[in-house]
């Protein structure tokens, strides 16, 4: 597959890094459970067009959203996390004559579409969480190699675009189609590095919620998040959400690229998947698919001093699309649980805000536990579900404060 209409030179990220202003991350910007080394080296840095994010790597750019940004259940574009596998990223000028090409062995025709062509199709909007499979990998014990994300390799936005199935219909899908494959306009520095390509099972690709989006929270998608067009796969982890989408292929056999067959895989049957990805299964592993039920405490911050007369705990909960049924809070290490109040429902693929009032805690250290249950009846576990690549960290949320 070649990137349609895109010059492959791209921006080679390197020397430019020194032009960005970095500062040491403050204690409250990082999760206190991150291993010591990770915390000391952490730096806050603003990529062009972004506010300060937690920098993990520059080349390729991996920047996470600080906890404070999750106070709003919609993540602002300039605080949305950034994740890349490869360091040659096209800039806006290079994408000026961008187009999307569609073809492949099981496509009825080859098509090349501009953004104006795509905008002729019916527009659809969905609020959905994009969460990296490796979000919170840095909290795995024992330690797992890979980008050491804290809690912020995720964000929730309103995406607007055309349905993937409407776009596929323009090229025509033949009856022998099994998967749809995607590639972006970014690429590797070295030709030996496999380009980032992903595929979806046909049934998932045809789902009405799967969009090719040009807008994010009412603005054009920021360059770092996939301008001018990205794939939105509500409920599935971020790895499928191809940015700078340049080429779509309708395949008559399973896609055999590195990023499907060797990476982003989990032990078979370890995690739920309403739509399994059987054409990519092997004896031992399956591709990662839907986001597991999860929650995050957004306030108060760890270590804060709170009034002994009582205080409010706030957070968000989300899952792979069945929606959040309840969030429960425990103040006694999980012996008893009480219901939190759920906030505004932005749809089953979105962050669901919640709050809970801690009334008259005993003075001293107060540890708050939060756990979410989804409409499929799954609850966050109290123990890590270990897997080799450090995916799907969803142990219940905790924060310890001092009541005085
Ligand atoms: N073109 C391209 N798209 C990509 C990736 C990439 O490296 N290149 N990374 C994927 C992964 S693993 C994630 S988690 C999301 C991250 O989206 P974001 O950078 O907008 O936060 O993009 C996905 N789409
Ligand atoms: Mo990811």
Image (tube, grey):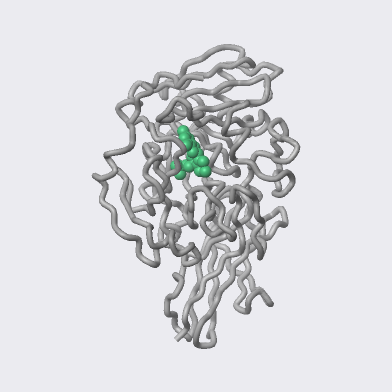
Q: Nearer the viewer, residue 122 or 35?
A: 35
Quadrant of image for the C terminus: bottom left
Q: Is residue 325 shown above or below 188?
A: below
Point out residue 152 in the picture as x, y percentages from the top left corner: 47, 54
Q: Quadrant of residue 48?
A: top left
Q: Nearer the viewer, residue 335 or 220?
A: 335
Q: Nearer the viewer, residue 120 or 57?
A: 57
Is residue 323 among the parts visible in the rendering?
Answer: yes
Picture mark count: 0
Q: Residue furthest top?
A: 109
Is residue 160 among the parts visible in the rendering?
Answer: no
Q: Residue furthest left?
A: 19
Point out residue 30 in the picture as x, y percentages from the top left corner: 43, 62
Q: Which residue sits at x=52%, y=37%?
A: 241
Judge left or right: residue 386 versus residue 303.
right
Q: Which residue sits at x=53%, y=61%?
A: 296
Q: Is residue 214 shown above or below 99?
A: below
Judge left or right: residue 291 versus residue 218.
right
Point out residue 294 in the picture as x, y percentages from the top left corner: 60, 57
Q: Which residue sits at x=57%, y=25%?
A: 166
Q: Which residue sits at x=57%, y=42%?
A: 234
Judge left or right: residue 49 versus residue 231.
left
Point out residue 32 in the picture as x, y percentages from the top left corner: 47, 67
């Amino acid at each position: 597959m070649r990137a349609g209409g895109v010059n492959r030179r791209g921006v080679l990220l390197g020397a430019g890094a020194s032009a960005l202003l970095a500062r040491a991350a403050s204690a409250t910007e990082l999760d206190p459970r991150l291993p010591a080394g990770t915390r000391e080296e952490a730096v806050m840095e603003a990529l062009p067009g972004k506010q300060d994010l937690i920098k993990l790597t520059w080349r390729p750019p991996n920047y996470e959203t600080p906890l404070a940004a999750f106070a709003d259940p919609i993540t602002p574009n300039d605080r949305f996390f950034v994740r890349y596998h490869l360091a040659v990223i096209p800039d806006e000028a290079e994408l000026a004559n961008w187009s999307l090409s569609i073809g492949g062995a099981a496509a009825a025709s080859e098509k090349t579409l501009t953004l104006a062509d795509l905008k002729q199709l019916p527009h659809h909007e969905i609020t959905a969480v994009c969460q990296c499979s490796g979000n919170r990998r840095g909290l795995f014990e024992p330690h797992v190699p890979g980008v050491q994300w804290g809690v912020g390799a995720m964000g929730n936005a309103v995406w607007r675009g055309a349905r993937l199935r409407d776009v596929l219909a323009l090229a025509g899908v033949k009856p022998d189609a099994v998967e749809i494959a995607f590639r972006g306009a970014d690429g590797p520095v070295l030709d030996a590095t496999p380009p980032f390509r992903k595929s979806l099972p046909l049934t998932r690709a045809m789902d009405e919620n799967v969009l090719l989006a040009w807008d994010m929270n009412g603005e054009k998608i920021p360059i770092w998040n996939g301008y001018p067009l990205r794939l939105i796969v509500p409920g599935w982890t971020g790895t499928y959400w191809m940015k700078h989408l340049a080429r779509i292929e309708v395949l008559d056999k399973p896609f055999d690229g590195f990023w499907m067959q060797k990476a982003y895989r989990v032990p078979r049957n370890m995690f739920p998947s309403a739509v399994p990805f059987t054409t990519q299964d092997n004896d031992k592993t399956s591709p990662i698919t839907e986001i597991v039920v999860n929650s995050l405490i957004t306030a108060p911050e760890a270590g804060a001093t709170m009034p002994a007369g009582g205080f409010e705990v706030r957070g968000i909960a989300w899952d792979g699309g069945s929606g959040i049924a309840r969030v429960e809070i425990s103040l006694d290490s999980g012996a008893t649980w009480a219901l939190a109040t759920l906030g505004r429902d932005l749809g089953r693929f979105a962050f669901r805000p919640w709050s809970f009032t801690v009334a008259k805690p005993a003075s001293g250290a107060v540890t708050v536990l939060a756990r979410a249950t989804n409409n499929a009846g799954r609850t966050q576990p109290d123990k890590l579900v270990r897997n080799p690549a450090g995916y799907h960290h969803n142990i219940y949320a905790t924060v310890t404060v001092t009541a005085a």
